[in-house]
Image (cartoon, grey):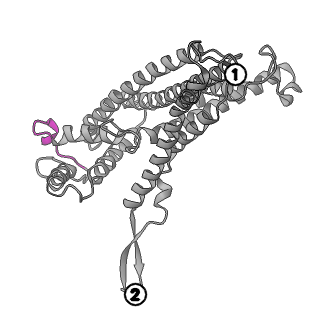
Amino acid sequence: MEWLKFAFDTLIIGALALPWLWLFMRMFFQRATSKQDDLKFPLLSLLSEQTRQTVAAVLIIALGYFLGSAVSRISSDFFDDEEILQRGMPTQTSIQQGVYLHEYCDTHSVLEATQLPMGLPQLPGGRVAFCEEEKLDLLHSLAHPSSGDPARVPRLVTEFFSLQESKMLLEGEEKLGRLREFHDQIEILRGATLNGAILFTLSWFGLCALYRAGIDNAESDGKILSGKLRAGKLKIPLKFATYVPAVACLLLGLWEMTQHFAHQHELSGTVSVANPAIGKSAPTPNPYEGHRDPPLAEAVMVLLGVGGLCLRISLADDSPRLFRNICLIAAVLTLIGYGSWWWTEVLYDQQVIHSFPTYIQSSLR
């Protein structure tokens, strides 16, 4: 069972994706047959009962691992996407930047007097390079708000954190159990929050589709929902209002995707390529820079918007109460998961920062 321990976090995230997968199947693939009918798979029905159970267990684990891996990667992109999580909402990079500037650059920081070994970039007094970069960027942005590279300090902090984190995590779970625990909690909370957001969105779209079906059914009686208003007057505005969430999700996803590629083009990296004409290397735009950051979160928003526009549900099969309850529960759990991830990310970054000097000193002995 060692393999199960290795994939435990991924399977947990995959298991938390099953509710929205079930809701997705219920909304988009309802069958006209009775609900009591069993769903049969021709290939599995040819196997014996014991073999069928074994194969089914393997398929469930494979599906859980696939969903967990996909949701984990998409959530990693979503929670570090400044185009989506904007207007002051914390991203993974902004949290790391805030923690690192506070721990290393604050005038009352204990780490200010800590010399960093291994040739890491630092300034006199133990203050690392991004402290001075932050000061210069702040002064430059005040003098020239429309110029400069605002991503310089976040890139320095991210690279600095990656070096420290990789060095610490390579030591194994026995020496750094608490650090590994925070790392696993971040993965699970981040994936759970994205699962909750998808479940909330699908249930919201399902509720809108049910109201559309109610408006269509009320047309035959000449009334809308409450039985007091004539269908001819309010049918079109009310029906249009039920499409607003899906249209907003689709347009926001398309807008964020265009912003993603535009931002990526502006910050495209350069590589040093030898130029025979001048006899030395010259900076050249990296032609594969766009492959480094795929628009995963934006694509999910576009797919959800398209699904919400195409959704049709019959009132005979579902009730608004089911979707309202799921929507409320998913919203509460998503907010709880997001807040928990935020604070766990802060604790994890602080743990990496505070453990790194002690670890380096012990490794040099």
Q: Main secondary structure of the magenta part?
A: loop
What's the residue at 86%, 25% (across, down)? 45
Q: Which residues are magenta?
A: 106-117
Residue 340 position in % (x across, y down): 37, 24
Question: In the rendered view, would you say 225 is above or below 198?
Answer: above
What's the residue at 41%, 32% (across, down)? 183
Q: Nearer the viewer, residue 243 or 17?
A: 243
What's the residue at 79%, 13% (across, down)? 36
Task: Classify mark 1: helix, strand or loop.
Answer: loop
Dot placed on the residue nearer the N-terminal end, 1 or 2: 2
Count of number-bearing discs: 2
Which residue matches tag 1? Answer: 314
Question: In the rendered view, would you say 95 is above or below 213?
Answer: below
Q: CA distance from mark 1 to mark 2?
A: 70 Å
What's the residue at 72%, 28% (across, down)? 29
Give neighbour class at mark 2: few <14, some 14-19, many 20+ (Cα, 10 Å): few
View extreme (bottom): residue:
277
Evaluate whether residue 287 shows in this view: yes
Q: Amino acid at mark 1?
A: Ser
Give neighbour class at mark 1: few <14, some 14-19, many 20+ (Cα, 10 Å): some
Which residue matches tag 2? Answer: 277
Q: Nearer the viewer, residue 112 or 262?
A: 262
Query: Viewed as shown, does residue 119 lie left or right of 236?
Result: left
Evaluate whether residue 18 shows in this view: no
Q: Amino acid at mark 2?
A: Ala
Residue 10 position in % (x across, y down): 55, 31
Q: Nearer the viewer, residue 6 or 298?
A: 298
Q: Quadrant of the C terminus?
A: top left
Query: Viewed as shown, does residue 4 lie left or right of 101?
Result: right
Residue 61 position in % (x across, y down): 66, 28
